[in-house]
Image (cartoon, rainbow, N blue to C red):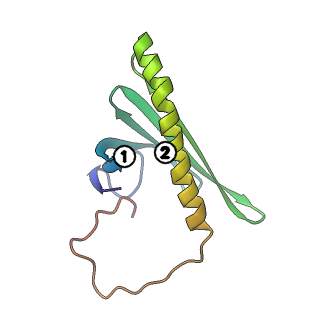
Amino acid sequence: MIRIERLAGEGYAVGTKWRETRKMMGKEATVDMWVTEVDAPARTVVKANSHGMNYTSGFTLKPDATGTILEMYFSGESESTSRISKIFTALFGRLGARVTGNSWQRISRTSQQKPRVSRVSKPPSPAPTLLCA
């Protein structure tokens, strides 16, 4: 993640919109994302559109005897129905699945670490843009 910029909304609610810029395969990619569903603290759905693809990501927290289970789903649908579009969707869909899988591996490793507490005497400069309040 390179940067996040809030575009609309307060806190985290339906309609909250932000722009994410990430580095993927050595190049910067910027995508606008927005919240379409919130059932705090158990579930949220986020949508995005990039280069003719509509993406939906959903996150659900479920209590479990050993802690909390984090479930995620991701889908992408092309706005085009052309044959070439279907070929590119099949090829790049695998890349998206790999990137998503790598993100979930990092989340899994981080969630199993002991919490870290740090004391900060002053906010870093420049102050970061916060997505969630």
Task: State the SS at label 1.
Answer: strand
Q: Can you tell which quarter of the image residue 79 is in?
A: top left
Among the two numbered marks 1 and 2 on one chain, the one whose residue lies closer to the N terminus: 1
Image point (58%, 55%), residue name = 105
Q: Residue furthest toward the right? A: 65
Task: State the SS at label 2.
Answer: helix
Image point (50%, 41%), residue name = 57
| Residue at numbered disc 1 | 24
Image point (21%, 71%), residue name = 126
**Amino acid on which disc 2 is placed:** Val
Q: Can residue 67 be spotted in the picture?
A: yes
| Residue at numbered disc 2 | 99
Image point (39%, 16%), residue name = 80
Q: Residue furthest toward the left? A: 126
**Residue 78: % across, % down:** 43, 23
> Closest to the observer: 88 or 58?
88
Query: What distance separates the C-alpha of mark 1 from that of mark 2?
Result: 9 Å
Within-10-Å neighbours for mark 1: few <14, some 14–19, many 20+ = few
Within-10-Å neighbours for mark 2: few <14, some 14–19, many 20+ = few
**Residue 118: % across, % down:** 43, 84
Residue 72 lies, with reference to residue 83, above or below; the image says below
Labelled pair 1, 2 in contact (Cβ < 8 Å): yes
**Residue 89: % across, % down:** 46, 24
Q: Is residue 41 left or right of residue 133?
A: right
